[in-house]
Image: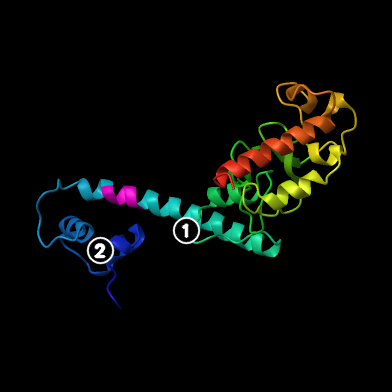
Amino acid sequence: MEQKDPKDMTAAELLRWAAENDKLRMRCDMCMKLYMMDSCGGHDCNDWLIDLADKIEADLAKARRGGLERCAKSWAKANGWPDFREGEGFGEWVNRCWLPIPRYEGGEPVDESDFGEGACLMVFGNGDWKIGNRYGGVIEMGSCRMRAQRPAAPDTQERICADALKSITRYWGCEEHPGCERCPARIDGKTPRDRFDTNSCGQAQMLDLLRRQRELDARKGGE
């Protein structure tokens, strides 16, 4: 039988090694086996007992973690959840795949910074979510029950042009929340028209589009 490295042997295997070899000097031989030494020295005679007890506890903890992860991997595969990534622990997998936050395909959580500087992610009690800009405009929205689409660049000319064609309610994300008292684009209690000091949210939309265009032009060097 191939000899295993002592550090790779379980506590039970070390004890069986001592018993099967009928060691007359078991205490010294076990100490030298555990510490991979050829002779005694540098240890108290009882050190190996303490370290062997620590190894037993570590083996049991590893077995518990392994059993939990094996069950989780089997359940995930059977129910269509993302697989564990290489080196990913159970807690990391839970955080990536189970928390009620928007996720991309594969289970990666949506990062608000993907949507540009000042973007803010909000998740509502019913599982809906939206990404807003610093002025309350809605950049993206969806439901945690569905996978989100990864954004392109934080803001582009194409996106600004597409948003310029949106209705006022679609632009500010209030199609499903009629009435200014339930405005989903409020920031610090202010609706878009209040923040931009205009007479309507339509005028606020135009000012917000102009702001985004100026920021885009500044990033492109004023082109």
Q: Which residues are magenta?
A: 51-55
Coordinates of residue 151 in the picture (x, y in percent): 66, 52
Q: Main secondary structure of the magenta part?
A: helix
Q: Which residue is mark 1?
A: 87
Q: Quadrant of residue 191?
A: top right
Q: Which residue is mark 2?
A: 18
User: Which-is-in-front pick, marks 1 and 2?
Assistant: 1
- Tell me if 48 is positioned left or right of 173 in this view: left
Coordinates of residue 51 in the picture (x, y in percent): 27, 49
Q: Residue at x 60, y 57 (%)?
A: 72
Q: Magenta span has 53?
A: yes
Q: Residue at x 77, y 28 (%)?
A: 192
- Tell me if 8 is positioned left or right of 155 in this view: left
**Up-down: is 45 above or below 63?**
above
The one of 144 and 18 positioned closer to us in this rendering = 144
Coordinates of residue 170 in the picture (x, y in percent): 84, 41
The one of 65 and 86 positioned closer to us in this rendering = 86
Name the element at disc 1.
loop
Among numbered discs 1 and 2, the one appearing first in the sequence: 2
Residue 6 shows in the view: yes
- Colour mapping used in the image: rainbow
Q: Residue furthest bottom?
A: 1
Name the element at disc 2.
helix
Amino acid carrying mark 2 in the image: Ala
Q: Residue furthest front?
A: 223
Could you classify mark 2 by the number of other residues whose Cα lies within 10 Å: few (under 14), some (14-19), or many (20 or more)?
A: some
Q: Residue at x 32, y 63 (%)?
A: 8
